[in-house]
Amino acid sequence: MSVLIKGGRIVTAADDYVADIYVEDETVTLIGESLDQSADKVVDATGKYVLPGCVDPHTHLDMPFGGTTTIDDVESGQTAAAFGGTTTHVDFIIQPPGSTFAEAIEEWRAKANGKQVIDMGYHMAVTDLKEGGTLEDLAALPEEGITSYKLFMAYKGALMVDDETLFKTMEVAAETGALVMVHAENGDAIDVLVKKALAEGHTEPKYHALTRPPETEGEATNRAIQLARVAGSPLYVVHVSCQESVEPIALAREKGWDVWGETCTQYLFIDYTHLERPNFEGAKYVYTPPPRDKANQEVLWNAVRTDILQAISTDHCAFRWDTQKSLGKDDFSKIPNGGPGLENRLQMIHQFGVREGRITLNRMVELLATNPAKLFGLYPRKGTIAVGSDADIVVFDPEKQVTITAADQHSKIDYNLYEGTEVTGSPDTVLLRGHVLVENDELQAQPGIGQYIARAKFGEELKSRRVEPAPAAS
Ligand code: URP
Ligand code: ZN
Ligand code: ZN
């Protein structure tokens, strides 16, 4: 299969120029002016941006959590991603306490087999180094292409680890070259605040935020940074939501420490007042960390503009409002934590980041594609458009007008965080390794086309490789 993309404005993290792209056997093989190669398919990209397929480093598909399971499985979540111009994501394997890492990997890969619409890799969320997981097994994961360890410093009684587990994992990462990711909130303090609020009869969704003050995020971010410094491991702070967390990251980076961070689309647009919406509407915005006071939005835009934060992910963790969020109708602490976003990240950041002058087009590509690919061992196969890269390409129409609405989305969730938002600019055609995934507002490829990517170790850019699917679990 060969594809010729004609006359588009190619935008990478570094460049911005008009040229043609020729794709053979899933790879970009030529970039130049007026290419006249014959091709099985020609895409006219005149007047359009030609962007690298976006990379989402933080998603949760088919994940059991909060007494239920996320509504999007690999097929529906990745379909939503494809329509939004995301062609690779890195999902979290959650080690069930008492299970080995090998058992957890088998379980997660079985959930994906045959359903993949885009390419994907995995992080390992370490929950237990006492009963199931061993330090030796943890150290072996990067050889299997799982080159990042995630630790939850919150969700006491569920996913939260103690500082001993956090620190030991950091020590292993320092040896193996894996990147440590933290959900940074002080879970013990939050647990006290939640119990106190419930004892006082406070059950509404807004108490989700009132029991998780920004200082608990700032404290945990600083603790993780200092512990990573002692252990000698690189650190990536996920879903940074507020100034209290941005500040220690900025300080660490000023000192030249190996600390990186992301925010998520929703923290740039949704604020605390959404949680106060009546008739349990507020439950739609119960994700963690919670929506913050609006003033934090400018802090976060500034952080992504100035490279205090390097990526914008979605933390897509979708629960339906009608049947899942309702588990917490009488108790905010029982509302499953998580929100959607895989489909709208590029549209929202283009509209309110680029069109409204907060970041450049190059910086948008860097935040949504290039930096996640570099940090998570996928670059330069993913995250850029260059000869030799996978032909993961988004032909983006900067003038296409779209009103974002749940009625048109591909996720199985029954609401959209950005309902009614009007954007100018949306993906037109999306290619995955040269295969047309999305065109004419239709999915053109069959599930199964996506592949698992064994990611390279942090800093070893060239070594990511594809791996055949594991046999389905019996
Ligand atoms: O509320 C959220 N973010 N749910 C997903 C799990 C996590 O903390 O990332
Ligand atoms: Zn988290
Ligand atoms: Zn998450």
Image (cartoon, rainbow, N blue to C red):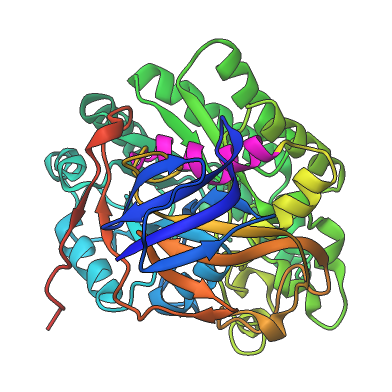
The one of 262 and 41 positioned closer to us in this rendering: 41
Over which residues does the magenta segment extend? 361-379
Q: Is residue 232 above or below residue 160?
A: above
The one of 47 and 461 positioned closer to us in this rendering: 47
Q: Identify the image quadrant of residue 75.
A: bottom left
Q: Identify the image quadrant of residue 91.
A: bottom left
Q: Position of residue 246 (x, y in %)?
A: 67, 31
Q: Position of residue 16 (x, y in %)?
A: 62, 35
Residue 347 belongs to the span the image colors magenta: no
Q: Main secondary structure of the magenta part?
A: helix
Residue occupying the point 63% across, 27% down: 307
User: Residue 277 vs residue 204: left or right?
Assistant: right
The one of 180 and 31 positioned closer to us in this rendering: 31
Q: Quadrant of the C terminus?
A: bottom left
Q: Is residue 50 above or below residue 325?
A: above
- Furthest-top residue in view? 255
Q: Quadrant of the N terminus?
A: bottom left
User: Residue 378 vs residue 357: left or right?
Assistant: left
Q: Identify the image quadrant of residue 283.
A: bottom right
Q: Is residue 257 above or below residue 110?
A: above
